[in-house]
Amino acid sequence: MATSSSFIAIVSMALLLGSVNAQLSTNFYSSSCPKLFSTVKSTVQSAISKEARMGASLLRLFFHDCFVNGCDGSILLDDTSSFTGEKNAVPNKNSARGFDVVDNIKSAVEKACPGVVSCADILAVASRDSVAILGGPSWNVKLGRRDARTASQAAANNSIPPPTSNLNQLISRFNNLGLSTRDMVALAGSHTIGQARCTSFRARIYNETNIDSSFANTRRSNCPRTSGSGDNNLAPLDIQTPTKFENNYYKNLLQNRGLLHSDQQLFNGGSTDSIVRTYSNSESTFNSDFAAAMIKMGDISPLTGSNGEVRKNCRKVN
């Protein structure tokens, strides 16, 4: 009997430790890699100085990582002869970018503290730094994620909301991941920076009526109606300030100047109109809600404790 009691105590302790291990923490690397934040920030700053769009690209990688089986660095894995990753899934092919910058950050972090910091955590920190460098809010990033040893192209195809999504589909997808409707509208504000490909907004600028006509004409000049022609031509998601992180995205929506169908769905007579109005009127409210939503998104199904691994090279499993 004593033996079974001891066994139960040990199992209980293991479960308790397991749940403690599962908690991310803002000071996870404070002793094991004290230079982590300065190392990441200087590398991100350098990349954005070379190309301002890179901030949006790094932020998007984090979104596309977290929405597919959690924030586990799976989006960074290259395809091999025996493994199909997420880079060539429909939402990422010819679109996801910034992998070289992640490699550079990882190399710099490995020099500072070898084998300690996961690629999943590097993405989380780099996305925060990108937003802050481009004029947006900053926040304390929770850390302690481990890297996945696998990835899923099918999950990437099914999990990342496409630009054709309607409002109910967006709300449902975010809710399924523990993100509220308000979180969703706040996170959509990441489209205050970055570019989209013609193939993602062609149908909107030629077929939809809830679009400012002069805005549609401007976009048509660089996005031919014929599919297959100019598919990869780029346009800014925020026509006003595409490399500055602020609330102009929401002001554009009030004018029917959302570039993607999914953008304008947020202000189209539906349940989220009032949130869009709030953010268009108050940049500080948007900033604080965005930061809070980014922290929540970073909590989606992380691998912790002894799960996963800390990759040496973000492109392949150890």
Image: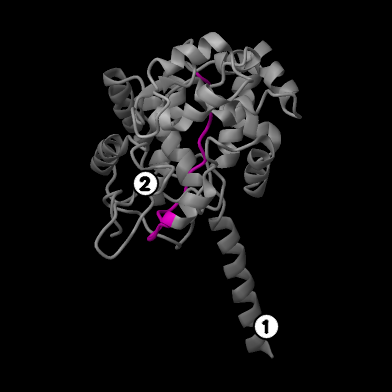
Image: 192 above or below 12: above
Which residue is most to the bottom?
A: 1
Instruction: Indicate the colouring scheme.
Output: one colour
* Residue 291 appears in the picture as rendered: no
The x, y position of residue 270, in whole percent, is 75, 28
Q: Element type at marker 1?
A: helix
User: Pointer 1: what residue?
Assistant: 5
- Residue 148 falls within the magenta-colored stretch: yes
Image quadrant in which the C terminus is located = bottom left
* Residue 240 appears in the picture as rendered: yes
What residue is at 53 percent from the left and 28 percent from the top?
A: 139
Residue contact between numbered discs 1 and 2, judged by CB atoms under 8 Å: no
User: Pointer 2: what residue?
Assistant: 119
Dot 1, how many residues are within 10 Å of its Cα: few (below 14), some (14-19), or many (20+)? few
Which of the two labelled residues, at mark 1 and mark 2, occupies the earlier sequence position? 1
Q: Is residue 210 left or right of residue 60?
A: right
Q: Quadrant of residue 249?
A: top right
The x, y position of residue 255, in whole percent, is 62, 12
Q: Element type at marker 2?
A: helix
What residue is at 64 percent from the left and 71 percent from the top?
A: 12
Q: CA distance from mark 1 to mark 2?
A: 41 Å
Image: 91 above or below 261: below
Q: Nearer the viewer, residue 191 or 135?
A: 191
What residue is at 40 percent from the left and 15 percent from the top?
A: 221
Callout 2 amino acid: Cys
The x, y position of residue 191, in whole percent, is 51, 25
Callout 1 amino acid: Ser
What residue is at 37 percent from the left and 60 percent from the top?
A: 149
The x, y position of residue 57, in whole percent, is 39, 31
What residue span does the magenta drawing correspond to?
Answer: 136-153
